Amino acid sequence: MSVRAGIVVTGTEVLTGRIADQNGPWLSHQLLTLGVDVAHITICGDRPADLIAQLRFLADQGVDLIVTSGGLGPTADDLTVATVAEFCNRELLLDPELEEHIAGVIRRYRPHTPDLDAGPTRIGIRKQAQVPTGATALPPTGTAPGVVIPAVTGDRPIPTIVILPGLPGELQAMWPRAVTSPAVADVLSQADDLQQETVRAYGLHEAQLAETLRRAEAEIADLDRLEITTCLRHGELDMVTRFASGDADLYRRLLGVLTEHHGRRIFSTDGSTIEDQLVDVLDGRSIATAESCTGGLIAARLTARPGSTAYVMGGVVSYSNDAKSDLIGVPAEMIAAHGAVSEQVAAAMAEGARRRLKADVAVSTTGIAGPGGGTDTKPVGKVCFGVAIDGRPTYTITRHFPGDRERVRTLTTTAALHLVVAQLERG
């Protein structure tokens, strides 16, 4: 990779887990699309010494670009600009135009602020309007401006540093101005044309994929030019490959080996998700859910996709036996005869949801997620599924999933989506 970057996410609230980091992954993805390899993402609290240590570490790693997020507010713990200026041996100077710009933003959104011209608010504005010498200020998308500090060469070089706000919405809105600033644009001009491709598989074990990759190394020369990472996520196995555009033929050969050995289990070679594929195979039909053990997780996955109102009719969380009978018409005598966790009840749940919600397709789950409630005949992890499609017999299947309650529910949700796609593809 010709250009490498490091990301420093600041904030004690992120370090301690009170807030999940959204900025690091988002910035990493944006940099990758620009041909920049992200070598490190670090998190540090609101302590100047720790931030300087992170900056020194990244500079010593030889990265070409450092991006920080957070610590640009008006309060005493917002020290990123001052700390980075100290690291770069640059003096902080007040930018009067920037000061008035920030004041104007506050005036628009909080017109009755009493101390806008003098007092704590004005002091905070002046703090945010301090810019290191030789740096470029990025106009705020909220009240916090960003800063770009050009690289310095020498015995201990300092890479170009971009300082961005911590609020994800403000950071993302500021990003286009950051990447077009002269110092950052100069770094990006040296980047390779990188590509990233994702293969997704279901029912394929990591050990099986690892063995196939070892075979591919023996068959394909220079395969190490591809950067391959694998990740097990929600019961699916993702393989992400990054490479320079000139190595596209190497990737095509690798993909050929993968599909030869695991073609039936690979469901996506273009990065599409199972939700994407479900929409395609629905082909204008509507879908509903009837969930017991998954408690609405399938409906949540379906509706998380933009535009889902076009095909999702709704969902019923029929957790209790009474709810199964009252809401979607599962006969009480069927539950008494076979138990709530049975293929007979799963079929009735799917059929009842399809009728009640007037959908073309419905999927159901009923099972034992644990940790308690299992028996010898119906252990924890046993789940029965039903897929009801208008004009066809209802399909049912029983699966057993390992792990704790959260894992069983997650694996069940993914399995349900794959079952719907498989049944719809049967025609």
Image (cartoon, rainbow, N blue to C red):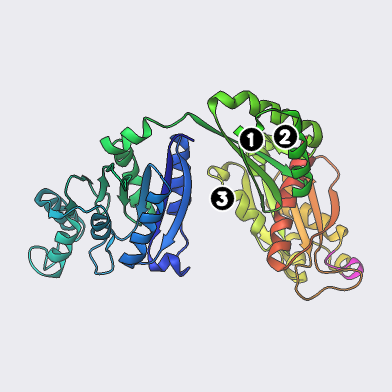
Q: Residue at x 26, y 46 (%)?
A: 149
Residue 366 lies left or right of residue 237; in this view the side is: right
In which quadrant of the rendered view does residue 382 lie? Answer: bottom right
The local crowd at label 3, few if under 14, some if 14 to 19, many if 20 or more residues have their Cα within 10 Å, is: few
Which residue in the structure is indicated by mark 3?
A: 304
For residue 41, which numbered disc appears in the image? none
3 or 2: mark nearer the eye? 2
In the foreground, 325 or 35: 35
Residue 338 colored in magenta in the image:
yes
Horizontal and vertical percent position of residue 323: 72, 68
Q: Residue furthest bottom?
A: 372
How far apart in space, not on screen, are marks 1 and 2 (Cα)?
A: 8 Å
User: Given the image, on which type of amino acid does mark 2 rest?
Assistant: Glu
Horizontal and vertical percent position of residue 79: 27, 63
User: Given the image, on which type of amino acid does mark 3 rest?
Assistant: Ala
Q: Are marks 1 and 2 in contact (CB under 8 Å)?
A: yes
The local crowd at label 1, few if under 14, some if 14 to 19, many if 20 or more residues have their Cα within 10 Å, is: few
Horizontal and vertical percent position of residue 104: 14, 53
